[in-house]
Image: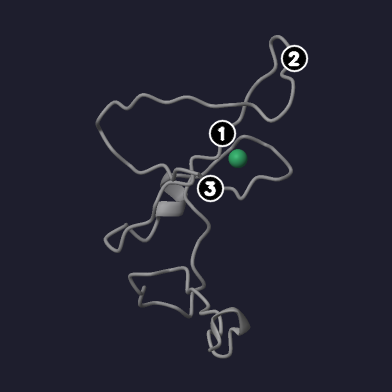
Amino acid sequence: MATARRSSRTAACSSTPLRAIAPGEELGYDYEIGRDKDDPPNVDEIYACRCGSPKCRGSMLEAAPKKKAAKLKPSRKPRRRKPQEGSPEHAQ
Ligand SMILES: [Zn+2]
């Protein structure tokens, strides 16, 4: 899945609905706009979402990182290494 980034460029975009959409039904879209280190402190205010959905995060930005983690590491999703020792298929 692609993550929306803030950009002034126009990009082609397509979406595939996961369910039937009724004629005239209002569609919501979670932009999950990426956060940057130089975002202003009120960035959540600027990008506040007022869609009114009960599932709404209240922001067009991606979910906020935990406040304790002030220093963001380049890789936000730590990968777990699978244990590679003792794989029986390659035992000689
Ligand atoms: Zn919303």
Q: CA distance from mark 1 to mark 3?
A: 11 Å
Q: Residue at x 33, y 42 (%)?
A: 6
Q: Position of residue 12 (x, y in %)?
A: 36, 24
| Residue type (three-letter) at the residue carrying disc 2 | Ala
**In the displayed image of the protein, which residue is found farthest to the front?**
92
- View quadrant of ligand 1: top right
Q: Position of residue 86 (x, y in %)?
A: 58, 90
Q: Nearer the viewer, residue 87 or 74?
A: 87
Q: Which residue is mark 2?
A: 22
Circle 1 sits in a helix, a strand or a loop, which is it? loop
Categorize mark 2 by other alpha carbons within 10 Å: few (<14), some (14-19), many (20+): few
Q: Tag 3 or tag 1, which sits nearer the N-term?
A: 1
Q: Is residue 6 left or right of residue 86?
A: left
Q: Is residue 87 above or below residue 46?
A: below
Q: CA distance from mark 2 to mark 3?
A: 26 Å
Categorize mark 3 by other alpha carbons within 10 Å: few (<14), some (14-19), many (20+): many
Residue at disc 3, CB closer than 8 Å to ligand 1 = yes
Q: Which residue is mark 3?
A: 59
Q: Which residue is mark 1?
A: 29
Q: Is residue 1 left or right of residue 58?
A: left
Residue at disc 2, CB closer than 8 Å to ligand 1 = no
Counting labels gives 3
| Residue type (three-letter) at the residue carrying disc 1 | Tyr
